[in-house]
Every structure is written in C-alpha cells, then in structure tokens.
Image: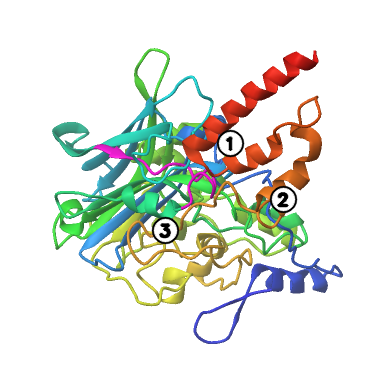
C-alpha cells in the first residue's frame, strides 16, 4: 500500500480508503497484485474505437511545462503509438509518412489555434531487398547498417480565425532516433539519442524518436475499477513499453500572447491522408483521460475528429460524468452532486487565478501558465498538493495524473476530500534533467543476459545440433553464427559463406 506525500497527516491510497468501506460492509479487500508486466487488455492510450486500430496515428499523452533547466523556455511533448513492444521487429516503429503531427497553441483563450507546429516525416530504405531494420551494428544515425531511417520537417504556421497568416520552416530534414533494436545492434543507444537532438536557430530544441512510455498507471481500472474489490492496484501496466515521441522546446515569449497574458492552451492532433488524398483529423489530445473516461462511446470518435471551438457539444459529458457513478455503484462512495462545474474549470477553462486566461471560451485544452516557475522538488499531485507548477497547470512527466484525476472526479475541489489513487506513484524509469527529459526506450534485447544468452558457448549450448549440416564433420556452423552475432558486415559475410558451404555439403550428401 502507498500513502500520499501531502503535508499534514498521511494520505491513504484508493486501496486503503475503500478497503475500509468494504470491510464495513462485511467484505474484505484483496491484497495488491505484484505481477510482472504483460500485455494489457485495455489502456487509456486506446481511447476511441477507430483510432485503436490505427496506432501509428494515436496520441497517447501530451505534456506542457516550463523547462526546469531553462525557465525562459517551454517544453511540449506529444507521444504516439501505444504499447510498443521493444522486440517488435522486423518492422519496428515509425511515424506515418502520410500524416501531419500537429501541436496547437491557443495563446488568448478563444479556443482557436494561434500557432501550429507541424511535424511531417519521410522514410528512407537503403536496401529494399533485405527484411532487416538494420543489417549490422549501428554506431551513428548515418551508419550504412541502419537500413531504415526517418527524417522530418517542422513548420511554424501562424493563424488568425483559422486562416493561415504565415508559414515558416523551423527545421528541415532532421534525423529521427531509431527504435532500440537491441544491445548487439545498437551498443550505445544513448549516443544515437543525443545525435537526434537538434538545436533550432531561435534558441529552441527538437527531438523525435523512440522513448520509454512516461505514463505510469495501473490500467486494470477498466476491470470493474481494479477488480471490483481492489485486488488489482499497484502495478505499472506501462512498465517496459515504449512510445514514439515528439519533443519541442521553444522560447516562451515565442508562444505567449504577451507578458500580461502568459497562459497558453495546448492540444495535439494527427491528420492522415484519406482515400481521396485529403488530410483528415483522426486523433486529438489535450488533458489526460478526457476522451478515455469522460466521453462516452458515442462521442469518442467524434471528439477525435473535432476541434476545441466545437467542444460545447461535449459539455454534458463533463458536467454529468459517468465515472463517479461507477465508483458509487461498485464501492458505495457517494458521487458528488451535479452539475459538476468544478470539472468545467479543470478540463475546459483552467483554474481561476492559476491558469484561466481572461475572457476564456470553454474548450478542452491543456492550459499552462508559463509565468509560474518550475519547482526544484516537484510534487506528484501538483496543484492538489500546493505545487502550482504541476497538473492541471500544464503537465510534467512526473505528475501522477491518474491519482489527481480520480480525486478531482470524486469532488476534491468541492469539499469531498479523498485519497483515491492506483498505488502507482512514479514511472519505473527516472527522467532526464535536460531536454528531451524522456527516459531512453527499453531495449529490444531486454532479458537476454538473464536467460543465459551472453556468449558464443551459450549460443552453441542452446542451439545444439539444430544448425549442423546433415553430414558429419566439417565447419562448425554454430561457431560461425556465434562469431557473426556482433560482427556487423563482416558477420553477414561469414553467414553468407557458411550458407554456401552448407549448400555444397548438402549437394554431396544428396
């Protein structure tokens, strides 16, 4: 079990809180599960029916925060492709060439985009006759053994009333950090990551590539709210999975309207070319969890195709949410009274006096007050714990948005104090102190040493006679394969020679 770190008395987790309620009703709550991560049956990353079948275009999370090491800049991070299995080759993870990955900024609160930062990608393949992502050891982003590469452009588009005022290219033909195939293929992945960080002429920075999924949560919430008896809390379901990330750091005065109006609203979208050749919006994300647990099924695909200035159609989903009613039905905790105007502030307007712009128009955006400087010791519950530099004032990588959203949903802002949470309080990997802050992805070769595959002898012992030719004697194919495992182009040549020898021996036998 876990406790909150808020000042004053310890704050109990959802498991502790509701266990008492169950016990009072004559039921005992089951213990916290400690299973190893595996395939998830549901995810806040798979928020709508249509986009769940198009992971390459699926926004998983959006972050916006004042850069902790450069407080005159703001960092925006948008993640895509949920549940990337690290060893998911030979077709590893790429951004779509037929898509526009957009980050929108509303800097005056009118629910319309004033700035649009557009990422477009191109894929290059060196040897289309090979099935491999890499044909040898990759030491840098220009290595000829990196068979499949991607590059991208960034366009800054200024808008007024949704009409283009100007368009400026911020970056051109920037390399994407590849998927981390494994330690044999990419022995120094961090070097590749650093080579993919590009400094912009305006003092900003950009990065695109694979990263550890920074979202931490026990997603078994969808199994009747943690099993119906709290037996399913405390496991980070996202542990060990990767995402494709876009990270952009820009001078704050570039994205704000003025020093007197420092609040920006941010959301990300993906537009994909349809069968007629036109771009069509298929994914949208602002605040975490809105389209997952606030919008009902009938509105999820509609929300992904809509824009913030059209959000009046979804207002009832916020003022009359389903989740508190489900918690009441399963755990007998009374839902707060409706309409939930407190949720309108959190999800649609921003909190008054914190991150609500003047003359705001209600719209689902992640709102950040850029004048609030980062704290040296961020608190995972952000504003709920007195840390105004955190969620729902923007979102940092360390913010525990599951616990925060549950507590707000259950009325924390209207006097119903509670300690709801999933008992997962931090990411399994630490975040960086410098841009792009994201943790490196989990390698495709994870667990290899633990299984004993760490030397040529181990390979020989495991493969045994499986690689031996039909005849007796002659060259040891097992030794040949083992020697080639880390040998790059030379190793591939050895494999080719071995196969020719094997065919000659086979022809003599048969």
Figure check: 430 above or below 171: below
Task: Classify mark 2: residues with Cα within 10 Å, few (<14), some (14-19) or many (20+).
Answer: some
Circle 3 sits in a helix, a strand or a loop, which is it? helix
Instruction: State how far apart marks 2 and 1 are (Cα).
Output: 51 Å
**Residue 458's disc number:** 2
Q: Nearer the viewer, residue 73 or 422?
A: 73
Q: Tell me which label, 2 or 3, sits earlier in the chain.
A: 3
Q: Position of residue 37 (x, y in %)?
A: 68, 54
- The answer to whether 337 appears left or right of 373 in the picture is right
Residue 150 in which image quadrant = top left
Q: Are marks 2 and 3 in contact (CB under 8 Å)?
A: no
Task: Classify mark 3: residues with Cα within 10 Å, few (<14), some (14-19) or many (20+).
Answer: many
Q: Position of residue 293 (x, y in %)?
A: 56, 48
Q: Tell me which label, 2 or 1, sits earlier in the chain.
A: 1
Does 116 appear in magenta? no
Q: Main secondary structure of the magenta part?
A: loop
Instruction: State how far apart marks 1 and 3 are (Cα).
Output: 22 Å
Instruction: State how far apart marks 2 and 3 are (Cα).
Output: 56 Å
């Amino acid at each position: 079990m876990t406790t909150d770190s808020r000042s004053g008395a310890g704050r109990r987790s959802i498991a502790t809180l509701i266990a008492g309620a169950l016990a009072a009703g004559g039921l005992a709550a089951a213990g916290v599960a400690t299973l190893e991560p595996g395939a998830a049956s549901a995810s806040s990353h798979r928020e709508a029916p249509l986009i769940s079948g198009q992971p390459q275009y699926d926004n998983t999370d959006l972050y916006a925060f004042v850069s902790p090491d450069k407080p005159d800049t703001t960092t925006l991070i948008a993640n895509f492709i949920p549940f990337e299995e690290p060893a998911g080759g030979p077709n590893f993870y790429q951004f779509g060439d037929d898509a526009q990955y957009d980050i929108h900024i509303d800097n005056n609160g009118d629910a319309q985009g004033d700035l649009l930062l557009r990422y477009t990608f191109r894929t290059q393949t060196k040897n289309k006759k090979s099935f491999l992502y890499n044909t040898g050891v990759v030491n840098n982003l220009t290595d000829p053994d990196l068979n499949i590469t991607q590059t991208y452009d960034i366009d800054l588009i200024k808008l007024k009333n949704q009409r283009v005022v100007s368009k400026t290219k911020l970056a051109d033909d920037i390399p994407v950090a590849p998927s981390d195939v494994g330690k044999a293929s990419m022995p120094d992945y961090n070097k590749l990551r650093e080579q993919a960080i590009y400094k912009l002429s305006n003092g900003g920075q950009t990065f695109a590539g694979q990263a550890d999924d920074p979202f931490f949560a026990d997603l078994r919430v969808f199994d009747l709210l943690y099993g119906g008896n709290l037996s399913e809390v405390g496991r980070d379901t996202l542990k060990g999975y990767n995402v494709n990330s876009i990270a952009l750091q820009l001078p704050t005065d570039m994205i704000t309207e003025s020093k007197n109006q420092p609040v920006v609203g941010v959301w990300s979208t993906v537009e994909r070319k349809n069968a007629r050749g036109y771009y069509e919006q298929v994914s949208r994300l602002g605040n975490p969890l809105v389209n997952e647990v606030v919008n009902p099924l009938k509105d999820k695909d509609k929300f992904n195709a809509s824009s913030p200035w059209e959000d009046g159609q979804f207002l009832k989903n916020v003022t009359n949410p389903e989740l508190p009613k489900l918690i009441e039905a399963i755990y007998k905790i009374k839902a707060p009274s409706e309409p939930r105007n407190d949720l309108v502030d959190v999800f649609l307007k921003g909190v008054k006096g914190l991150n609500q712009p003047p003359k705001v128009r209600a719209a689902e955006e992640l709102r950040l007050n850029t004048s609030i400087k980062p704290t040296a010791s961020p608190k995972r519950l952000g504003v709920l714990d007195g840390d105004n530099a955190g969620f729902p004032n923007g979102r940092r990588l360390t913010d525990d948005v599951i616990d925060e959203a549950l507590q707000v949903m259950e009325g924390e802002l209207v006097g119903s104090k509670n300690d709801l949470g999933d008992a997962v309080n931090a990411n399994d990997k630490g975040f960086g102190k410098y841009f792009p802050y994201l943790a490196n992805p989990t390698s495709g070769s994870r667990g290899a040493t633990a299984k004993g595959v760490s030397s040529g002898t181990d390979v020989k012992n495991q493969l045994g006679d499986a690689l031996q030719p039909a005849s007796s004697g002659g060259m040891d194919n097992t030794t040949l394969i083992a020697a080639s495992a880390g040998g790059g182009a030379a190793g591939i040549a050895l494999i080719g020679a071995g196969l020719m020898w094997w065919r000659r021996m086979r022809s003599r036998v048969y």
